[in-house]
Amino acid sequence: MKTPKSDIEIVIIEDEEDILELLEYHLQKAGFQTIGFGSTHKVEQFLEEENPSLLIVDRNLPLVEGSEFIKEMREKGYDVPVIFLTAKDTEQAIDEGFLRGGDDYMTKPFRMNELLHRVHAILRRTGSTKQAKLKHRDLLLDVEAQTLFIDNKAVKLTKMEFNLLYTFMKNPNKVLQRDFLVNQISEESQGKTINVAINRLKHKIDPDGSKEYIGSVWGVGYKLN
């Protein structure tokens, strides 16, 4: 049985394209997945659907100032760690950054190696390197405890079912082919085994079929809705 892979995803909100590309290049080179936004537009929607481990946020952004956006996200219950990376370098600005929900604060110009050290330090401190918990709709997957909660009620899963759900929750709204699922769950599994496991998983997490968490895509595979 394979252990679920730990794919650390970092969101970068930066309106200067050259800096955004530089950050993505070095973070990907360090082994992280990244997704970049030029403003806060659509970031909240992304956070509703995905489970990033860290946000790197500029403050001088169009539409909504970066620290104001993080303050709003904190008030809505989002606790993703945040590093502000900004040209705002006064004592007052730094205080604002922390008071509005920042976990760390770096000013531009900056050293890339120092930023990477700070990224690793925050991920270690928060346990995000282990992707300790994943959330999708009313599903909460505690990876370390190997436990699923639905509406705060524990639901017992087999190891295969747990790893299947973990794979789906790491790839929400994406169509996953059967071969991909077989490879993620067990090298010895076959297509029929995966089909049976998915049907059992669907019944456990959605007994009456009303929530339709997992959908079939004819001839391709499955997706988490």
Image: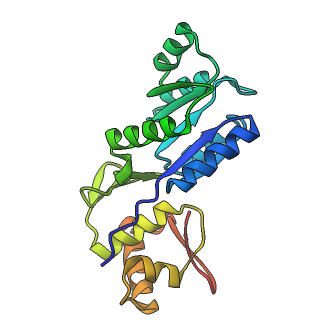
- Please identify the quadrant where the N terminus is shown: bottom left
Q: Is residue 127 left or right of residue 116?
A: left
Q: Is residue 39 left or right of residue 53?
A: right
- Please identify the quadrant where the C terminus is shown: bottom right
Q: Is residue 86 left or right of residue 31?
A: right
Asked if 202 appears above or below 130 in the picture, the reply is below
Give the residue displayed 52% in from the left and 19% down from the top.
Answer: 97
Extreme top residue here?
Answer: 92
Q: Is residue 9 left or right of residue 58?
A: left
In the image, 139 versus 116, the foreground residue is 116
Give the residue displayed 62% in from the left and 17% down from the top.
Answer: 88
- The picture places residue 197, in percent across and down from the top left corner, at 38, 81
* Snapshot quadrant of residue 23: top right
Asked if 161 appears above or below 92 in the picture, the reply is below
Asked if 13 appears above or below 31 in the picture, the reply is above
Q: Is residue 206 visible?
A: no
In the image, 14 versus 225, the foreground residue is 14
Give the residue displayed 31% in from the left and 48% down from the top.
Answer: 152
In the image, 97 versus 203, the foreground residue is 97
- The picture places residue 126, in percent across and down from the top left corner, at 34, 40
Q: Is residue 140 visible?
A: yes
Give the residue displayed 69% in from the left and 38% down from the top.
Answer: 19
